[in-house]
Amino acid sequence: MNQETINQVLHFRDERNWKQFHNPKDLAISISLEAAELLEVFQWSAEDVRCEDKMDKIREELADVLNYCILMADACGLDMDEIIREKVKKNAEKYPVEKAYGSKEKYTELKNGIID
């Protein structure tokens, strides 16, 4: 994540003296609530895989989720780039291309070889 963007989110928080309210528990709750609002965009939709006409709301809710993730990482002293790189590496081990290519299966269910 771009450090300038992270700094902008933190500056917004600090200008309002909100850091005092941003403990990991409450930030985790906020991430979950905002993720639920993102999911709500698709609730009761007949074509739940389409999003072209919902992009404004998706952008807004996704930004809320990401903002709270930045605040959570800051509260926990975590570097977002580092934790994302570590997770991608771990996922690459769990989902090797030769087993996972084209499959939606969980890593515990992957078969040997490429799925046709």
Image (cartoon, helix red, strand yellow):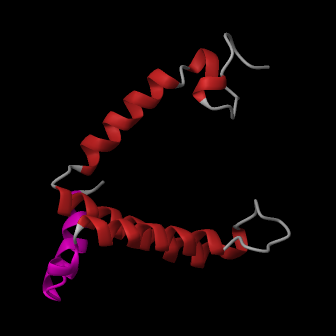
Name the quadrant containing residue 97: top right
Please identify the quadrant where the C terminus is shown: top right
Count every numbered label the image shows and give the total: 0
Name the quadrant containing residue 104: top right
Magenta span has 7? yes
Q: Position of residue 109 (x, y in %)?
A: 66, 24
Furthest toward the right, the residue is 46
Residue at (86% x, 70% y) in the render: 46
Q: Position of residue 26 (x, y in %)?
A: 31, 72
**8 displayed left or right of 109:** left
User: Is 90 rendered above or below residue 38?
Assistant: above
User: Is 89 rendered above or below residue 25?
Assistant: above
**Is 97 or 4 nearer to us in this picture?**
97
User: Is 116 rendered above or below residue 90?
Assistant: above
**89 displayed left or right of 39:** left
Residue at (21% x, 49% y) in the render: 79
**55 displayed left or right of 69:** right
Q: Position of residue 4 (x, y in %)?
A: 21, 64
Residue at (75% x, 63% y) in the render: 50
**35 displayed left or right of 65:** right
The magenta segment: 3-22
Q: Position of residue 44 (x, y in %)?
A: 79, 74
Magenta span has 95? no
Please identify the quadrant where the N terminus is shown: bottom left
